[in-house]
Amino acid sequence: MSVDGNGKVALITGITGQDGSYLAELLLAKGYAVHGIKRRASSFNTQRIDHIYQDPHAPAPRLKLHYGDLADTSNLTRLIQEIQPDEVYNLGAQSHVAVSFEAPEYTADVDGLGALRLLEAIRFLGLERKTRLYQASTSELYGLVQETPQRETTPFHPRSPYGVAKLYAYWITVNYREAYGLYACNGILFNHESPRRGETFVTRKITRGLANISQGLEPCLYMGNLDSLRDWGHARDYVRMQWMMLQQDMAEDFVIATGVQHSVRDFVRWSAAELGITLEFSGSGIDEVGTVAAIADPQAVTVRPGDVIVRVDPRYFRPAEVDTLLGDPTKARERLGWVPEITAQEMCAEMVAHDLAAARRHALLRRHGYDIAVVQEN
Ligand code: NDP
Ligand code: GDR
């Protein structure tokens, strides 16, 4: 494989995910040779990176995919031995908080021990002085928050099997840095989204669900906790910071956030407004509903004033919730000059535009007799 460009070689776990796809684009643009680990699945799972795919038969491809899994020690060790990466970005994870309550052991294995397997492979292969590691840590570590806003020094109190698994990964990364002098660091990233966000995370569920409703593909959006408060940024801004963290003289941990907080209900309202729909919320708890109050352009949408298009379904409540998260990115700004460029509202507009285009295509197909299944999940 070619190491043209800047001569650096990166390995990304989770390259088929939201962040992995943006990071791969960024590193390729910087001239890296990029290797990614993808899981074997019974159907294609590379949609997010198909646009940067390079035919392995072509001369000097700079993107290469390998089958692998964070649960498989020998696979990871062999890949690191073969690839000899300068930088490893550990983005792979069972990343859904609600699902981690359903599959806690698997989540612990992949999200917790997966990080250890990579660190141990670097150490075992004697690559401590060559290979730098980025660990995808999370604001879910703060969980039941002890201080607002949350910064690098705020104590952790995770509230889910996902958060607890990521807590292990956080500390084992710090431990290998302290014990073996590895350049290994944690990015404590707050929620970040994009049109490539998985369809079952709240922002994408909202933009996709409301776009579908506006085109008559679904009747209603069923939501969990509308009061939840999050600090939402754009994935494109956040992967820039992941790269910056590995280019410093010394490995350090950073909070990556916007410093601005909104509720899930706000995000529903903004998304509806992007579609020309004014939503009014009434009731409370599981009886809360979102009703169409006004429409900007009746030709553009199939809903009408008075239609109830948002309801609460307790199925989407979590056994333990993280009610509020707000990050303080001061250290990242002062030390690395990082500032987010895209606001949550701008990101929401981009996501709605993306999902509306897809909904219109589906609606058109349906009008011409092709039945398109529309699935809604948590
Ligand atoms: P995604 O869920 O979009 O992507 C996760 C990636 O991990 C996918 O490529 C997935 O593969 C892969 N993966 C899952 N299980 C395994 C496994 N057993 N072995 C190898 N790979 C696996 O997550 P994001 O891109 O949003 O997040 C990237 C990382 O950052 C994750 O670790 C997440 O926990 C963390 N994080 C995310 C935040 C966010 O708001 N997005 C905030 C803070 C942290 P497949 O495509 O086959 O499913
Ligand atoms: P989160 O993201 O749990 O913060 O983890 P998610 O978008 O799933 O939930 C955010 C908040 O919205 C509430 N919510 C709902 N969530 C989902 N998924 N579906 C719903 O219908 C719904 N209704 C309300 C949730 O209860 C929660 O409070 C994300 C993941 O990317 C993690 O991997 C990452 O570590 C953290 O962000 C930072």
Image (cartoon, rainbow, N blue to C red):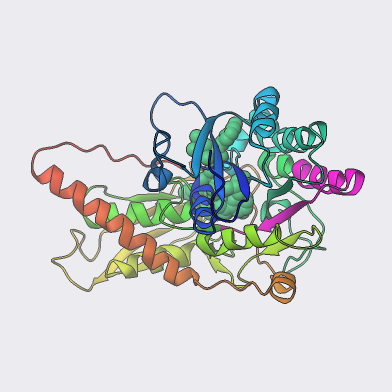
Relative to residue 286, is residue 311 drawn left or right?
left
265 and 180: which is toward the camera: 180
Residue drawn at x 69%, y 70% is 329
The answer to which image quadrant residue 307 occupies is: bottom left
Q: In this view, does 298 lie above or below 158?
A: below
Q: Quadrant of ligand 1?
A: top right
Q: In this view, does 91 lie above or below 259?
A: above
Residue drawn at x 74%, y 59% is 145
Residue 212 pos. (x, y %): 27, 52
Does 188 lie within the magenta span? Answer: yes
- Bounds of the magenta segment: 167-191
Residue drawn at x 75%, y 42% is 169
| Whether residue 102 can be seen here | no
37 and 10: which is toward the camera: 10
Does 212 lie within the magenta span? Answer: no
Residue 98 pos. (x, y %): 57, 41
Residue at the outermost right position: 179
